[in-house]
Image: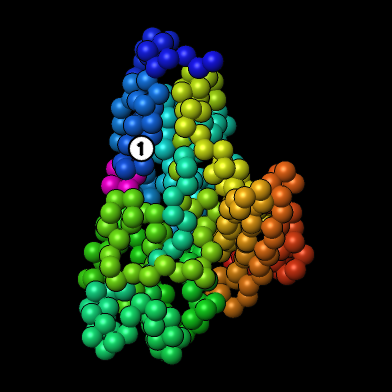
């Protein structure tokens, strides 16, 4: 039987220090964890820590190693006992956690898709001409030099695979900064994660969901980590672990790990529960988007524990191995 919140506070009198980056979205995510801890009777406070990804806003993320760039500073603070838990966007977390750090909880997943935000001026013009969001896709196909901004190598490859004549520009910074930059630059549009904009209620009206674009593994999920020896904090966090989200994101991250070990790559994956089945879809693309190998399957939940590794092996055997090797060679 679970102890009452009052008993938990007595057992764990310390305040749980929650590490977070300083961006509005990161603080929103950490606040969710703080609220959940308090719901279960634990005291908690936020501790703000800068990350390399926040400090360097010029270097494209795929040149910085992407995975780990937003998590290293928080993980270092955790290992140095400056905080008790770190809250990460799960898609930013390397598939292999640092030694001494363990997954404490995965929150219920939010929106997983990417969205395209049109430059406000362009959206106004298209609306005046009678072109609504449902028409935008065909207009992009016929336009020879659409300029789209993104810092994600995955989004870049998938966009170029569908719209090969487009020009891709690098876009860095937190979501607020990127929206502002879209309006200041001469670009036509930019790609964002739906969850990032909707969670802090800044999704523009001139945006459309990219149903055809597969998300990054674990996109839309929030991971809470703690020190491996901190059993009390781990016990506190397990109260709000969402089992379905944890199961599906593990499949996606197993897929990523098996393909390329979590390095900077155009790899996408999405697993979701459908009654008693798991529906999985994943792909890998070449850096320029000209090559693509994908795999899709549905299977019963009780058979799906090794699904991520199995799907990755199918991709590798169908031509993905050559794409993966070309990506590795490009990075050397």
Q: Nearer the viewer, residue 31 or 323?
A: 31
Q: Give the quarter of the figure containing the C terminus.
A: bottom right
Task: Look at 29% across and 87% down and name the residue there.
Answer: 130
40, above or below 109, in the image: above
Q: Quadrant of residue 124?
A: bottom left
Q: Is residue 187 visible?
A: no
Task: Look at 73% across and 70% down and name the residue there.
Answer: 319
Q: How many marks?
A: 1
Residue 22 drawn in magenta: yes
Task: Look at 42% across and 15% down and name the residue there.
Answer: 4
Q: Residues within 10 Å of mark 1 (few under 14, many from 20)?
A: some
> Horizontal and vertical percent for residue 16?
37, 23
Q: Outermost residue toward the front?
A: 275
Q: Is residue 320 visible?
A: yes
> Horizontal and vertical percent for residue 299?
71, 54
Find disc 1 in the rendering and name its residue.
32
Q: Nearer the viewer, residue 48 or 175?
A: 175
Left/right of residue 318 with respect to residue 281 in the rendered view: right
Q: Quadrant of residue 271?
A: bottom right
Tell me the element at label 1: helix
202, above or below 158, in the image: above
Q: Nearer the viewer, residue 177 or 327?
A: 177
Q: How is the image coloured?
A: rainbow
Residue 243 drawn in magenta: no
Q: Outermost residue toward the right?
A: 317
Magenta region: 21-26
Q: Give the quarter of the figure containing the N terminus.
A: top right
Q: Quadrant of residue 57?
A: bottom left
> Horizontal and vertical percent for residue 37?
39, 27
> Horizontal and vertical percent for residue 99?
57, 32
Task: Look at 50% across and 82% down and name the residue there.
Answer: 164
């Amino acid at each position: 039987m679970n102890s009452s919140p009052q008993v938990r506070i007595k057992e764990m009198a310390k305040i749980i220090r929650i590490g977070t980056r300083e961006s509005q979205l990161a603080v929103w995510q950490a606040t969710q964890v703080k609220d959940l801890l308090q719901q279960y009777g634990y005291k908690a406070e936020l501790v703000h820590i800068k990350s390399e990804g926040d400090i360097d806003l010029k270097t494209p993320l795929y040149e910085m190693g992407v995975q780990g760039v937003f998590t290293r500073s928080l993980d270092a603070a955790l290992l140095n006992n400056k905080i008790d838990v770190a809250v990460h966007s799960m898609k930013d977390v390397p598939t292999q956690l640092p030694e001494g750090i363990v997954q404490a909880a995965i929150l219920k997943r939010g929106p997983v898709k990417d969205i395209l935000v049109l430059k406000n001026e362009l959206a106004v013009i298209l609306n005046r001409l009678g072109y609504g969001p449902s028409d935008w896709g065909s207009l992009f196909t016929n336009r020879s030099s659409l300029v789209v901004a993104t810092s994600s190598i995955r989004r870049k490859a998938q966009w170029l695979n569908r719209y090969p004549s487009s020009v891709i520009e690098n876009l860095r910074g937190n979501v607020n900064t990127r929206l502002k930059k879209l309006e200041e630059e001469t670009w036509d549009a930019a790609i964002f994660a739906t969850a990032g904009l909707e969670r802090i209620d800044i999704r523009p009206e001139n945006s459309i969901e990219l149903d055809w674009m597969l998300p990054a593994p674990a996109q839309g999920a929030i991971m809470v980590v703690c020190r491996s020896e901190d059993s009390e904090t781990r016990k506190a966090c397990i109260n709000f672990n969402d089992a379905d989200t944890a199961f599906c994101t593990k499949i996606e991250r197993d897929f990523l790990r098996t393909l390329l070990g979590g390095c900077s790559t155009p790899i996408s994956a999405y697993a979701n529960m459908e009654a008693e089945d798991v529906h999985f879809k994943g792909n890998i693309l070449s850096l320029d988007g000209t090559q693509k190998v994908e795999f899709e399957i549905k299977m019963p939940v009780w058979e799906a524990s090794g699904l991520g590794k199995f799907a990755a092996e199918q991709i590798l055997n169908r031509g993905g191995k050559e794409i993966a090797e070309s990506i590795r060679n490009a990075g050397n």
